[in-house]
Image (cartoon, rainbow, N blue to C red):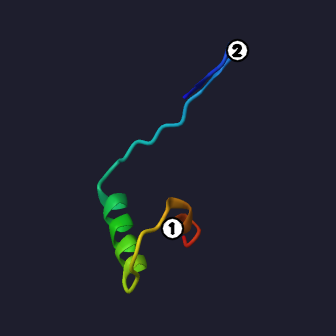
Amino acid sequence: MLDFANDTILFTHDAKSRVGFAEGAVRAAEWIKGKTGFYEFPEIVDQF
């Protein structure tokens, strides 16, 4: 949330089911297969 004198910016996420989490887990497993080491968030996001 960013709160300013004249307005507020709020970013929210509402999960309507577990499907999105399951799809994300499968995509992550497919991406990580065969890789080793540690990865930072920007490295992962750039792949999708």
Badge 2 element: loop
Q: Nearer the viewer, residue 3 or 18?
A: 3
**Picture coordinates of residue 30 (x, y %)?**
38, 79
**Picture coordinates of residue 33 (x, y %)?**
36, 83
Which quadrant does the N terminus fall into? top right
Above or below 15: residue 31: below
| For marks 1 and 2 on the same chain, the one whose residue lies earlier in the sequence | 2
**Picture coordinates of residue 24 (x, y %)?**
38, 65
Say which mark, if any, is on residue 6.
Answer: 2
**Picture coordinates of residue 7 (x, y %)?**
66, 19
Which quadrant does the C terminus fall into? bottom right
Residue ranking furthest to the front: 37
Residue name at image x 41 percent, y 82 percent: 35
- Which residue is labeled 1 in the image? 44
Residue name at image x 55 percent, y 30 percent: 10
Disc 1 crowd, CA 10 A, few/some/many (<14, 14-19, 20+): few
Residue ranking furthest to the right: 6
Residue name at image x 45 percent, y 42 percent: 13
Mark in front: 1 vs 2: 1
Residue name at image x 53 percent, y 36 percent: 11
Say which mark, if any, is on residue 20.
Answer: none
The answer to whether 17 appears left or right of 6 in the picture is: left
Q: Nearer the viewer, residue 1 or 39?
A: 39
Question: What's the residue type where badge 2 is placed?
Answer: Asn
Above or below 7: residue 47: below
Q: Nearer the viewer, residue 48 or 40?
A: 40
CA separation in Å, label 1 and label 2: 36 Å
